[in-house]
Image: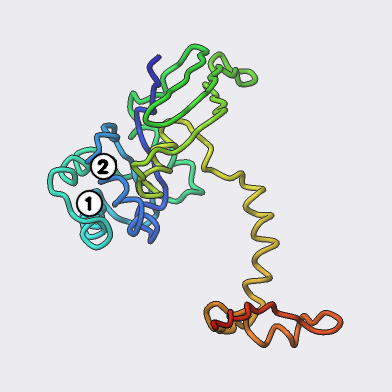
Amino acid sequence: MDVFHSDTLVFFGATGDLAYKKIFPALQAMVKRGHLNVPVIGVAKAGWNLDQLRERAQDSVEKHGGFNPAAFDKLCSLLRYVDGDYKDPATFQTLRKALGAGQHPAQPNYCRFQISPDVTLAFGVNVLAAAEDTGDTVELLASHHPGADEMDAYERVLGDAMAGDASLFAREDYVEEAWRIVDPVLKAGTPVYDYEPNSWGPREVEERVLPVGGWHNPKVAAERME
């Protein structure tokens, strides 16, 4: 059964560091692999125009992705730009106009499996939103094993986003909770100690964690040759 992808890719923060270092190189790689052939709309609040965004994209792939003239030219032909404040509803009205006739295609319920190159078992069902006449297709991915042909992390994330695969995405409340736990540790200024390879760790650990009777590190006695 055919698997339908989104007919437009929209990414926010198009003028930021993440887009510069990761997103544009991933987009060029997707074009080169034949995985991207739909309009790509970058959104940002920078006072830029499309030509400036294309210049930024070229500088990005030259420094971080390896410039490929053919793939980059095609990427430029797909690239669009919307400038505006995310808090301003007019920005999203402009974005809607930029989307044009693009819409996520409706799909029937389905069960699919794939053996090669990835092993995948998935169930897709249409979910009707409350008070809406149409809904979205939600896919339950029961099993998935990445293939040997590894892609760049952001290339894979963008491809999965277009395919509606949320496996690599975290929920907002999960991310906030992780930062609540990790952030104090990162800000605590915990010292890092060097230690010799094949040893049992730095000596400073004995000043902080010391069991009754001290540590007894096992040693391998050299065999005596007669």
Looking at numbered disc 2 in the image, what kind of residue is underneath it? Leu
> How far from the left and from the top, in percent, is residue 153?
41, 49
For mark 2, give the secondary structure: strand
Q: Is residue 105 above or below residue 217?
A: above
User: Can you name the residue that lies furthest to the front here?
Assistant: 226
> How far from the left and from the top, in percent, is residue 211?
82, 79
Q: Quadrant of residue 4?
A: top left
User: Can you name the residue that lies furthest to the right here?
Assistant: 212
Q: Are marks 1 and 2 in contact (CB under 8 Å)?
A: yes
Please give the name of the residue rendered at 33% of the width and 35% of the height, measured from the top-left corner: 98
For mark 1, give the secondary structure: helix
> How far from the left and from the top, in percent, is residue 5?
38, 26
Q: For this rendering, which residue is in front, 69 or 209? A: 209
> How far from the left and from the top, in percent, is residue 110?
51, 14
Label 1 neighbour load within 10 Å: few <14, some 14-19, many 20+: many
| Residue at image mark 2 | 79
Q: Left of 195 or right of it: where is 19?
A: left
Q: Quadrant of the N terminus?
A: top left
Q: Quadrant of the C terminus?
A: bottom right
Q: Left of 167 or right of it: where is 159?
A: left
Whole-angstrom CA distance, mark 1 to mark 2, is: 8 Å
Mark drawn on residue 54: 1
